[in-house]
Every structure is written in structure tokens, then in C-alpha cells.
Image: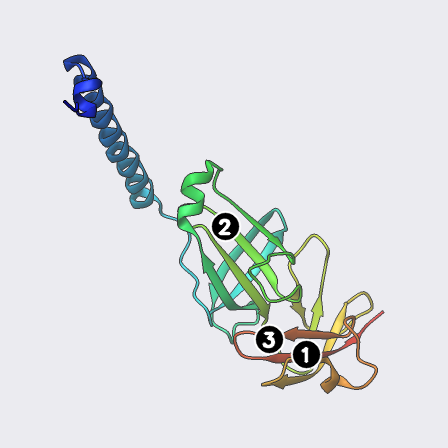
């Protein structure tokens, strides 16, 4: 006569109770974790959300930047948000403090000509910023500060914007001798090339 596996290896009443307790604990833990995450998200009141296409004033140090929304015609609006990548779930799992940072090295941005603004928070995101400039504008560029438009091209100012080509992100439109040192390429979302003159 064949015996079933249950008959060969009977589960005791204590074993069944232990299994039920484990399942109940796992369910409670899931509910508590989800509730904490929801509470953190609900209580978070960060800075105003900045969307693609909006202009902003970026100031401060690389490790302590400040990004404030501005009208694009405002002289203080030195950047435009070209791309935004949201990752709120990543911050909740990372257990890192709320912080901001700026550099030129985010893999989320198409190239290093974009400034990458990171925020680690319940709204965890990366913004890829491009300069908000017109032909003839002069821009200063300090290694520890955000680039800013200045009123005139003075010695020590890094570059002057000579030409802007919309619809192309191609260094060759600035001339056969153009290099990475005197051009800025923004391939996304709308291709744009800035041709520069370095001021020394």
C-alpha cells in the first residue's frame, strides 16, 4: 500500500502554527514598511517641482547648489531644464539624507555639456540643464560655482556666445577648426549647438 508524502512526513500542529505566525509577521512587516514610505512621501514638502522647458537660476557651490524657478526672460535665469529623470523609489531604499549636488558627470544626461543637478529626497531626481543664453551673451564659469551670464565680456570671463544653431547638435557648424573647447552641444530634447569664443 502506497503512502502519501503527508503520511510519511506528517506536519505537527506546532509546525502549522509556526508557519501561520511567520506568514502573519511577513504581512504585518509589509504593511508597516509601506505605511512608513507613504508617510514620508506625504510629509515631504520640498522645493517647487521644476519641469522640462522651465528656466531657473542655479547658484551656490557644487555640493550645496540652489535651483530656483525663473521666467526665461529674467536676467538671472541662467539655465533651462532639458531633461528630467525621476527615481523616488531609489531614495526610499537608499537610506541617504536629503541632499543636492551639481556636476557634469550624470549618465542620465546625453553628454558632459549639460549640468547635472541631483536631488536625493522623496522626490529623488536628476535634472539635465542647458545654458539659457542668446547670441552675444557672455558667461562666466567658475569650477566651484554655477555658470552665470555677465553684463560684459571681461578678462577672466570664460566665453562669449558667437552663434547658436537650433536643430543641430554638430560641432562642424561652428567651422572646420571647432573643438570641444569652443563649442557646446545639446542633442536632447531639441538639438542645439553653441559656438563660443574663449576670452583669456
Residue 154 spot, x, y in % from top left: 79, 70
Callout 2: SS: strand
- Crowd class of label 1 (few under 14; some 14 to 19; many from 20; radius 10 Å): many
- Asked whether, in this view, residue 135 is left or right of residue 87, the answer is right
- Residue at the farthest front position: 1
Callout 1: SS: strand
Which residue in the protein does label 2 denote?
A: 119
Q: Quadrant of the N terminus?
A: top left
- Crowd class of label 2 (few under 14; some 14 to 19; many from 20; radius 10 Å): many
Who is closer to the viewer here, 7 or 71? 7
For the residues labelled 1 and 2, the Cα–Cα distance comes to 27 Å
Q: Which of marks 1 and 3 is nearer the N terminus?
A: 3
Residue 177 spot, x, y in % from top left: 83, 82
Q: Is residue 89 above or below residue 163?
A: above
Labels 3, 2: front one: 3
- Asked whether, in this view, residue 79 is left or right of residue 125, the answer is right
For the residues labelled 3 and 2, the Cα–Cα distance comes to 23 Å
Which residue in the protein does label 1 denote?
A: 194
- Asked whether, in this view, residue 185 is left or right of residue 41, the answer is right
Label 2 near label 1: C-beta < 8 Å? no
Labels 1, 3: front one: 3
The residue at 16%/24% (across/down) is 2
Which residue in the protein does label 3 denote?
A: 187
Amino acid at each position: 500500500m502506497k503512502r502519501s508524502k503527508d503520511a510519511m512526513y506528517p506536519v505537527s500542529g506546532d509546525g502549522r502554527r509556526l508557519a501561520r505566525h511567520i506568514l502573519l509577521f511577513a504581512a504585518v512587516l509589509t504593511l508597516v514598511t509601506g505605511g512608513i514610505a507613504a508617510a514620508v512621501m506625504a510629509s515631504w514638502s520640498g522645493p517647487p517641482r521644476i519641469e522640462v522647458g522651465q528656466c531657473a537660476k542655479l547658484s551656490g557651490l557644487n555640493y550645496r547648489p540652489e535651483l530656483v524657478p525663473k521666467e526665461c526672460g529674467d536676467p538671472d535665469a541662467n539655465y533651462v531644464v532639458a531633461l528630467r529623470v525621476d527615481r523616488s523609489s531609489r531614495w526610499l531604499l537608499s537610506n541617504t539624507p536629503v541632499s543636492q549636488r551639481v556636476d557634469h558627470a550624470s549618465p542620465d544626461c546625453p553628454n558632459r555639456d549639460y549640468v547635472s543637478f541631483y536631488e536625493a529626497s522623496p522626490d529623488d531626481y536628476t535634472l539635465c540643464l542647458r545654458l539659457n543664453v542668446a547670441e552675444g551673451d557672455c558667461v562666466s564659469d567658475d569650477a566651484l560655482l554655477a555658470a552665470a551670464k555677465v553684463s560684459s565680456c571681461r578678462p577672466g570671463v570664460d566665453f562669449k556666445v558667437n552663434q547658436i544653431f537650433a536643430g543641430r547638435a554638430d560641432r562642424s557648424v561652428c567651422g572646420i577648426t571647432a573643438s570641444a573647447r569652443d563649442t557646446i552641444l545639446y542633442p536632447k530634447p531639441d538639438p542645439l549647438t553653441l559656438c563660443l569664443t574663449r576670452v583669456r
